[in-house]
Amino acid sequence: METLENLRKKLSAAKDIKAVVRAMKAMAASNIAQYTTAVSSLGDYYQTISLAIAAYLVQEKLHGIYDIEKVPKKDESSIHAIIFGSDQGLVGRFNNLMTDFVTQSFQGMPGKKEIWVIGERVQVLLADSGLIAEKTFAVPNSIEVVTPLIGQILIEIEKVLGKSPNHVFYIFHNKPKAIAGYDQVIQRLLPFDEKWQNEFSKIQWPTKNTPQIVGKSKPALLAFISGYLFVSLFKACAESLASENASRLEAMQRADKNIGNLLGSLGHKFHRLRQSSIDEELFDVVSGFEALKKKQGD
């Protein structure tokens, strides 16, 4: 049977947990704002890179990047998947949903698969599904650490392409919805396909002046493409981090609600037991008084 002291300890512990949960909720909300702001700030940079690539296509009178060099047709026999997950818990089904999405997506991709994973949690789940990561990276814990991570990934991509150009790179990550929650998305990073070419060929130069590339055209194009790859990976990472914190915020909101219900239940039990204890004490006092009164009457 529970005692007042036992219930008092449980109430104190529940209040401490509730304070921690509220602190984590505030931190998650702050992180969401940080990462969504970073994604928004990429808009102008991405627009500049897009205009630069479009300007190159106009100056060189090309309809697509594949006109620059005779690149062999895509070889789907070697697919590299860059998967963004999490290193920390309390994120609900964040990593589970990503694992299921990757597994289902791979079913329609014939050929050899090589997985690069950002996050230990999703790596374990992928391994349980039979997908072993070839490379693993730590998840950034702040927006300042995202840039070094993207630099590492780009270096690894360059190493792979240096050995053979016939590799296909995909990005898998969670992307926040407009209102609440997040979805799993896939983006083809390399090589550039017709969809990518059509996207840039439709871009209109903002002025009537004809754009020109200063200096040699090929090094300029390589710099533009490098910037495009950086933006694509940076955006995917920031969106994944925003989604992770959104999932954590939802988990903390559920925990806060459950702890609130628990506090209400414990509080009700505590007050009921306390009232019962007071009633027993009063009954003992009244009984003792009546016994004493009776004894004095005798």
Image: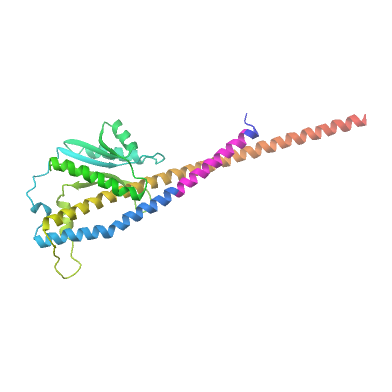
Residue occupying the far bottom of the picture: 208
**Quadrant of the image for the N terminus?**
top right
Left/right placement of residue 227 relative to residue 244 reads left
On whether residue 9 falls in the magenta region, the answer is: yes
Q: Position of residue 56 (x, y in %)?
A: 13, 60
On whether residue 133 falls in the magenta region, the answer is: no
* Residue in view at x 52 percent, y 44 percent: 19
* Residue in view at x 31 percent, y 54 percent: 39
Residue 63 vs 173, above or below: the answer is below
Q: Position of residue 292 (x, y in %)?
A: 87, 31
Residue occupying the far left of the picture: 70
Residue 56 vs 27, above or below: the answer is below
Image: magenta residue range: 6-26
Residue occupying the far right of the picture: 298
Helix, strand or loop for the magenta stretch, by majority: helix
Coloration mode: rainbow
Q: Position of residue 249 (x, y in %)?
A: 42, 46
Where on the picture, by quarter, is residue 209? bottom left
Q: Is residue 176 visible?
A: no
**Quadrant of the image for the C terminus?**
top right
Q: Position of residue 49 (x, y in %)?
A: 21, 58
Residue 202 vs 230, above or below: the answer is below
Q: Considering depth in this image, is 111 or 138 the residue closer to the camera?
A: 138
Q: Considering depth in this image, is 112 or 137 the residue closer to the camera?
A: 137
Left/right placement of residue 19 relative to residue 62 reads right
Q: Is residue 155 visible?
A: yes
Q: How many numbered badges does the structure rendering display?
A: 0
* Residue in view at x 29 percent, y 56 percent: 42
